[in-house]
Image (cartoon, grey):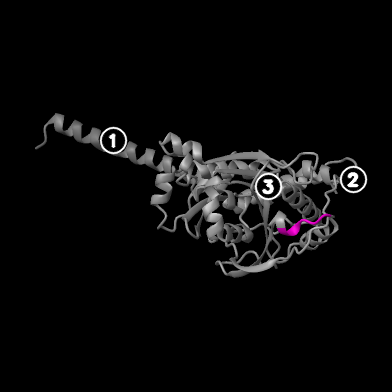
């Protein structure tokens, strides 16, 4: 027979088990409720993120209130590079912000007004595009570029998720300047640099910190009153999604050439601005400017229909080979005595 004390102890243990089960149930319900709003939101340091690279569980992060997912890329010569892009739900939010800005009452928008109205929710720079990989691979597989990178300043226009800038930084470029006219992509890039990759800037060696650096700068390509930062190489990937951005890119390319910089432009199939880019280069007196097709790959992440149409060749369920056009411009080759640049921002 049990003593009175044993009976009391047994009852207390049973009561504690019931309470624990109740608490676990409540916590589980709260967790499910939160995950329905922010599914699998996990913040990783570079070490934990890279250590889990072999499993198929997507790693989510929240940057400035935007839910993002890691996109690992295998870049020639340097290996794994991780960038962030907005999830499907976050793309919906960004698209709605852009549409709300477009619907605000006022005078008919000029190009400069378009740029201002999209700054709170431009969705294009929050996802990855095929030309970014093609440009990064083109530079890193070229022995001349690889030799020069430790002494170079590279400027990226319309950096978006920043795959090119990040890859060149990890490859040992002396200084990378990542620019975009929207702050959100730059914040995604900065997060990826600081937390998701083995960044030479985070090395304890002070000398290495001084040798490799990246800066982030807001820059509207169409605002020609703002000069380009000085660089040895200017790169741009998939930014000619409208004729006006194509014309602006041509003027910026000439500006860079006149400063003595080389220019590398990548463009995926079907971009509406490519024709305007080529026409404007010709109008500005650039000679011998041609695109050369190179093998790239489609992107496989989700895309909102207003970011990337259903018939787009840039996205597929799994990555597929895709011909990406690349143009290289050298001031010693492509500038002529008649080359001019207009201050017109159209």
- Where residue 35 appears, as percent x and y from the top left, is 50, 46
Q: Rounded to the nearest whole Å, what is the CA distance between mark 1 and mark 3?
A: 50 Å
Query: What whole-number distance in Å separates the C-alpha atoms at marks 2 and 3?
Result: 22 Å
Nearest to N terminus: mark 1 or mark 3: 1
Label 3: which residue? 94
> Tag 1, which secondary structure?
helix
Q: Label 2, on which residue?
A: 108
Residue 337 seen in the current view:
yes
Residue range (magenta): 333-337
Crowdedness of circle 1 by 10 Å Cα count: few (<14), some, many (20+)?
few
Say left or right for 254 vs 342. left
Q: Which residue is drawn at 83% across and 57% down?
A: 285
Instruction: Say which mark, if any, is on residue 178.
Output: none
Q: Where is residue 276 in the image (x, y as percent from the top left)?
A: 81, 60
Q: In this view, does 57 lie to the left or right of 168?
A: left
The residue positioned 29% from the left and 35% from the top of the image is: 16
Q: Earlier in the sequence, mark 2 or mark 3?
A: 3
Residue 246 in which image quadrant? bottom right
Answer whether residue 334 is magenta in the image. yes
Count the numbered circles shown.
Answer: 3
């Amino acid at each position: 027979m049990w003593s009175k004390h044993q009976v009391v102890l047994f009852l207390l243990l049973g009561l504690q088990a019931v309470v624990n089960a109740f608490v676990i149930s409540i916590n589980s319900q709260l967790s499910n409720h939160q995950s329905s709003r922010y599914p699998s939101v996990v913040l990783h340091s570079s070490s934990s993120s890279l250590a889990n690279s072999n499993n198929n569980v997507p790693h989510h992060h929240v940057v400035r209130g935007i839910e993002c997912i890691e996109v690992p890329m295998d870049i020639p010569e340097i290996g794994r590079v991780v960038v962030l892009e907005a999830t499907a739900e976050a793309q919906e939010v960004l698209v709605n912000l852009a549409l709300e800005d477009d619907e605000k009452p006022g005078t008919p928008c000029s190009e400069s007004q378009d740029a201002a109205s999209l700054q709170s929710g431009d969705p294009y720079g929050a996802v990855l595009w095929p030309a970014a990989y093609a440009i990064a691979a083109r530079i890193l597989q070229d022995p001349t570029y690889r030799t020069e990178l430790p002494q170079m300043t590279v400027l990226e226009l319309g950096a978006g998720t920043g795959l090119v800038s990040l890859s060149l930084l990890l490859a040992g470029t002396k200084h990378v300047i990542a620019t975009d006219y929207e702050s959100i992509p730059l914040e995604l890039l900065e997060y990826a640099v600081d937390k998701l990759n083995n960044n030479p800037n985070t090395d304890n060696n002070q000398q290495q910190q001084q040798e490799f650096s990246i800066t982030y700068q807001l820059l509207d390509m169409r605002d020609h009153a703002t000069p380009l930062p000085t660089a040895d190489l200017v790169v741009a990937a998939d930014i000619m999604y409208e004729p006006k951005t194509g014309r602006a890119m041509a003027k910026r390319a000439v500006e860079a050439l006149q400063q003595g910089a080389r220019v590398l432009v990548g463009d995926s199939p079907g971009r509406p601005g490519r024709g305007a880019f080529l026409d404007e280069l010709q109008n500005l007196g650039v000679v011998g400017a041609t695109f050369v097709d190179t093998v790239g790959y489609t992107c496989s992440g989700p895309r909102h229909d207003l970011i990337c149409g259903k018939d787009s060749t840039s996205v597929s369920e799994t990555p597929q080979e895709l011909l990406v056009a690349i143009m290289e411009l050298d001031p010693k080759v492509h500038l002529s005595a008649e080359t001019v640049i207009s201050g017109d921002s159209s």
